[in-house]
Image (spheres, helix red, strand yellow):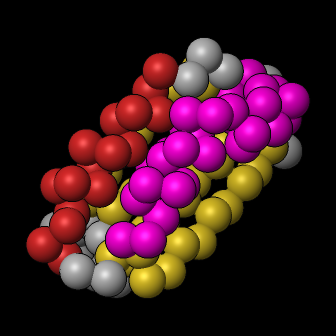
Amino acid sequence: MILENTFAHHVLFWLNDKADKQKFVDGLKILTTITTIRDIHIGIVADSHGGPTDDTYDVSLLILFNSQADHESYEIDPIHQGFIGEYGKLCAKVVAYDSINA
């Protein structure tokens, strides 16, 4: 099935200390209460071996929105901003990829 009317926000996190992984994952779950989010996936590196797979990150966040406007609302949502303030310091590197339907 091809998703229609979808804005995808995929963020990869590299933690300063791998011992903080569960704490960080638990923190990401706070984001699930943001009403503009359509679907959310919180993940860790899969043991998939091979190909062009980047397995250097620690935690992955994939959020689907119905529109770019919903994503923009998420970015300024106080819950999201609170997450950044509380958990952002646990990260050595954060990379986000945003895409819309082709």
Q: In screen coordinates, is 101 left or right of 82?
A: right
Question: Which residue is nearer to you in this view: 82 or 9?
Answer: 82
Q: Where residue 41 sits in the image (x, y, percent)?
A: 40, 39
- Residue that appears at 29% across and 56% down: 24
Q: Is residue 7 visible?
A: no
Q: Which residue reaches farthest left?
A: 19
In the image, residue 77 above or below residue 35: below
Q: Quadrant of the C terminus?
A: top right
> Residue sitting at 32 percent across and 82 percent down?
16
State whether residue 2 is above or below residue 41: above
Asked which quadrant contains residue 54, the reply is: bottom left
Q: Report the magenta stretch's main SS.
A: helix
Residue 49 appears in the figure: yes
Q: Quadrant of residue 57?
A: bottom left
Nearest the viewer among 94 and 3 is: 94
Q: Is residue 18 left or right of residue 68?
A: left
Q: Position of residue 87 (x, y in %)?
A: 41, 58
Q: Is residue 32 left or right of residue 66?
A: left
Residue in the picture at 55% in, 34% down: 79
7 on left or right of 69: left
Toward which corner of the image does residue 7 lie, by quadrant? top right
> Residue at left 64%, top 34%?
78
Quarter placement of the N terminus: top right
- Queried whether the magenta region covers residue 83, the answer comes back as yes
Asked if the stretch drawn in magenta spans residue 70, the answer is yes
Q: Depth check: 89 or 21 in front? A: 89
User: Residue 94's spot in the image, x, y percent?
Assistant: 53, 72
Bounds of the magenta segment: 61-90
Identity of the residue furthest to the top in this view: 35
Rendered location of residue 46, percent (x, y): 22, 62
Position of 87 relative to 69 (above/below): below
Whether residue 16 is situated above or below residue 66 in the rendered picture: below
